[in-house]
């Protein structure tokens, strides 16, 4: 009986170790996800700004008409 209890105790300790490790890993992944979302949002804003600058620059270019037809 004592052996069974000791075996169960060891299994519970291993499970707790796994749960703690998975919890730590989950927290790390949540942090990575937040950072990735922030980077994505920043990139989207930068692309929007760049597109607006390109469109603004294009609108200031003179229109060239080619009548060589």
Image (cartoon, rainbow, N blue to C red):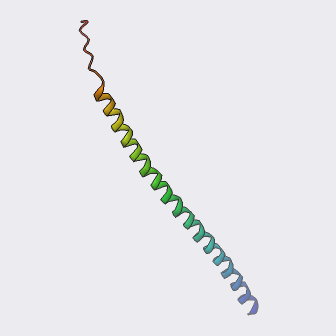
The picture places residue 44, in percent across and down from the top left corner, at: 40, 46
The picture places residue 46, in percent across and down from the top left corner, at: 41, 44
Q: Is residue 12 above or below residue 53?
A: below
Quadrant in which residue 61 is drawn = top left
Q: Residue furthest right?
A: 3
Q: Is residue 60 above or below residue 69?
A: below
Residue drawn at 39 percent across, 38 percent down: 50
The picture places residue 13, in percent across and down from the top left corner, at: 68, 80
**Foreground pick, 34 / 26:** 34
**Foreground pick, 44 / 64:** 64
Residue drawn at 66 percent across, 82 percent down: 12
Quadrant in which residue 11 is drawn = bottom right
Residue drawn at 69 percent across, 85 percent down: 8
Q: Is residue 57 above or below residue 37?
A: above
Q: Is residue 39 above or below residue 26?
A: above
Q: Is residue 10 left or right of residue 67?
A: right
Residue drawn at 50 percent across, 57 percent down: 35
The N terminus - image quarter:
bottom right
Q: Residue furthest bottom?
A: 1
Total labels: the figure holds 0
Q: Is residue 47 left or right of residue 64?
A: right
The C terminus - image quarter:
top left
The picture places residue 59, in percent across and down from the top left corner, at: 28, 29
Q: Residue furthest top?
A: 68
């Amino acid at each position: 009986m004592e052996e069974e209890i000791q075996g169960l105790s060891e299994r519970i300790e291993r499970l707790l170790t796994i749960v703690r490790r998975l919890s730590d890993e989950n927290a790390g992944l949540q942090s990575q996800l937040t950072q990735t979302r922030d980077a994505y949002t920043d990139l989207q804003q930068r692309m929007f700004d760049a597109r607006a600058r390109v469109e603004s620059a294009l609108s200031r270019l003179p229109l060239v008409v080619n009548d060589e037809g």
